[in-house]
Image (spheres, helix red, strand yellow):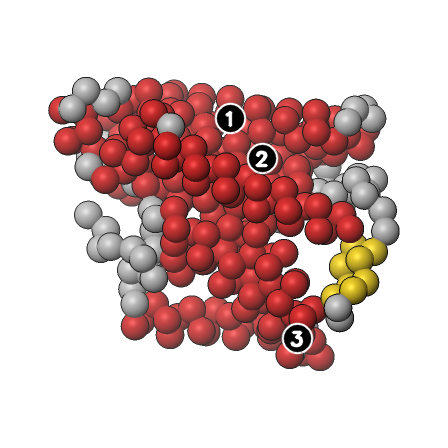
Amino acid sequence: MEQVIANGLYLGAQYALIALGLTLIFALMNVLNFAHGQMYVLGGFITYTVYGQLGLPFVVALLASGATLAVIGALMEKFLFRTVIRRSHREESTMLLAAATAFFFDAVILLLFGEKQRGVPKIVKGVFNEAGIIMPYDRLVVGALAIIFIAAFVLYMQYSRVGRAMRALAQDRVAAQLMGVRVDRYSMIGFAMGAMLAGIVGGLLVTITGVNSGIGGPISIKAFLMVMIGGAGVVGGAIAGGFILGMMESVGLTALREYGDVTYLVIFAALMVFLSIRPNGLMGKPWG
């Protein structure tokens, strides 16, 4: 049981960090960023290049992943999503744009890095083996860093001026604009932060699971699962959804380890039942 809980918390921390970036973008712009998984993959490949290939310190590689994805996110918001939102009155337009960017990033990543699985040297060696828990130290470090990033994000959103402006924008875009909030500026910052979180978690997890060009889609699906569980556009819901999915996956893989991918079938079935009872998630409100 201790091992299952430890694995669930480790998975939950990384999943929550993935979901935070997606739910932030949705809360600010009402856009489902289908390219979120591809941003994760790109962050992993940047860390692979800087840390694994160039031999620079892991911290430098992680900062490079976050900064690069932040710039990409800001450019996407300013030149793509902002333009489409202004010119189109149909929400389907932003969804199609998001899907197109996902396919574009898939093609770019495949062209630049190929389809082979890539990995990097362990950032910490050794295995923790105490109190019935066996876990490599690098997983403990990655899990701890993920929790630190989650806490820093929540505190930043709660107490910083930028965070308060983005929370006001998420609650009521028109009212925030009337109160003097620079909507375009904070939408761009929010999109950049969401992309940055995807790049950071991709950089963290390349040290554990490696990265390849084909995992962007599955990562996006998991991110959507977590957002739907917690409630679309709710930061606390994204965190809760991440830890719930992580614990469900840990329990399922342990209880159903003889049946392979049946675990995910059970998780999807449970999610369908849950959403039929609470279609807005644990903390979400009706869209619109």
According to the image, label 3 marks what residue?
1
Q: Are marks 1 and 2 in contact (CB under 8 Å)?
A: yes
Q: Residue furthest right?
A: 126
- Label disc, if present, on residue 70 of the rendered structure: 1
Label 2 is placed on what type of residue?
A: Gly
**Residue 48 or residue 5, whichever sits in front:** 5
- Label disc, if present, on residue 199 of the rendered structure: 2
Q: Quadrant of residue 181?
A: top left
> In this rendering, does residue 106 appear at all?
no
At horizontal 31% and vertical 57% (from top left) the residue drawn is: 283
Label 1 is placed on what type of residue?
A: Ala
Which of the two marks, 3 or 2, is nearer to us in this view? 3
User: Which sits earlier in the primary sequence, circle 1 or circle 3?
Assistant: 3
At horizontal 46% and vertical 52% (from top left) the residue drawn is: 239
- Label 1 neighbour load within 10 Å: few <14, some 14-19, many 20+: many
Which of the two marks, 1 or 3, is nearer to us in this view? 3
User: Which sits earlier in the primary sequence, circle 3 or circle 2?
Assistant: 3
Query: How far is mark 1 from mark 2, CA to CA?
Result: 8 Å
